[in-house]
Amino acid sequence: MGSSVLTPFAEPGVFRAGAAGPAGAPGLAGGPGPEPTPAADLAADRAADLDLDEIEAFYRQHGFVILRDLLGEKLIARMEQECEAAQAGVLAGDLSARYGSTQYLDDAAKAERFVNYVEHIQELAPAVGEAAEDPVLTGVIRRLIGARIWLSGSEQTGVVYQDARPGRESGYTRIGWHSDWQAMPSLDVWPGLAITIHIDATSPANGFLRVVPGSHQWATPAPYRNVNGVPVPADARPTGGYTDTAPPFEMPLGFEKVLGEIAVYAERGDVLLHDGYLWHSAARATDDDTRRRHVRGSFFAGEQAAYRRQFIKNAAR
Ligand SMILES: [Fe+2]
């Protein structure tokens, strides 16, 4: 992690891939550029600039990292365009119900007026699949959670395109404290991590991620107490985390301040990896005319055969 003369808290956990960047390097987008370099060379260049030991050490300690300038603006621009087309297709009713989700919304009826989510976006937006298979990215993920990783794909929950925005028509503006493990505490698919590819940079204006660094180490209880009154099945593991150490305080049910929490802001194109055991929430936008779009999926390193449908909707919305 680079240090800053301004403050040691500037962009903690941000690691930059190749300064020259892959396809999205300035001057390459759209116009004629230098002779194309073979993809393998580009991947090698990008990987060479990432210190995997440093990334792994930060992740073990804090539970998240951001990989910057990894995918390139060209791929992100394509992703944006493909995702927007899919979103328009869902709203127009042109795409099957498989893609038009309401399960994550605060009120399912709002999906008729605005589409916050497109599920299984990897089937509609080829750029999403390309990004998820990026060899440098998957190399980092193997270092973080285990050698035998698999993406939650078409047989599982799939990758989701999210368009969060404030406003009454929107059914997804924020989410309360949770760990992702709490949504599937019965399954032996863990450890796992969430991957978020940011199409829009985040800020207080359009909403942002809050995390409790180090909370992935705690043995966080399954969400027996939750604001939605959703039952936790009897076969759930009682706790999820990398150690047996109980959290120093209870996870709040809503959006309360948590001691030690930080904001994690992202730039367009950033790839955020956060652990499935990490406590996190998302703050609502303060500016009504903004949006916060990203593509979000999960990689697991546990047993793929142990996957079955489970979604305990414990987090406040
Ligand atoms: Fe989450």
Image: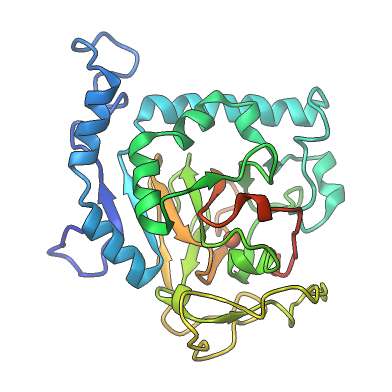
Residue 190 lies, in percent from the top left, at 56, 62
**Which residue is at a point 18% across and 37% down the rendered structure image?**
19
Is residue 291 visible in the rendered image? The answer is no
In front of the other: 195 or 109: 195
Left/right placement of residue 12 relative to residue 183 reads left
Question: Residue at point 59% right, 82% down?
Answer: 251
Examine the rendering and report whether any part of residue 207 can be seen. yes
- In the rendered view, tell whether residue 225 sits above or below residue 25: below
Instruction: Identify the image quadrant of the C terminus.
Output: bottom right
- Residue drawn where x is 65% and y is 53% of the image: 166
Instruction: Decide which of 282, 195 is in the foreground and name it.
Output: 195
The number of numbered discs placed on residues in the rendered structure image is: 0
Q: Position of residue 97 (x, y in %)?
A: 83, 34
Where residue 32 appears, as percent x and y from the top left, is 26, 8
Name the foreground residue: 176 vs 251: 251
- Quarter of the picture containing the N terminus is bottom left
User: Which residue is drawn at the image coordinates 36% and 70% (left, top)?
Assistant: 62
Measured as percent of width and height from the top left, residue 227 is found at 76, 77
Q: Residue furthest left?
A: 5
127 over 256 or under it: above or below? above
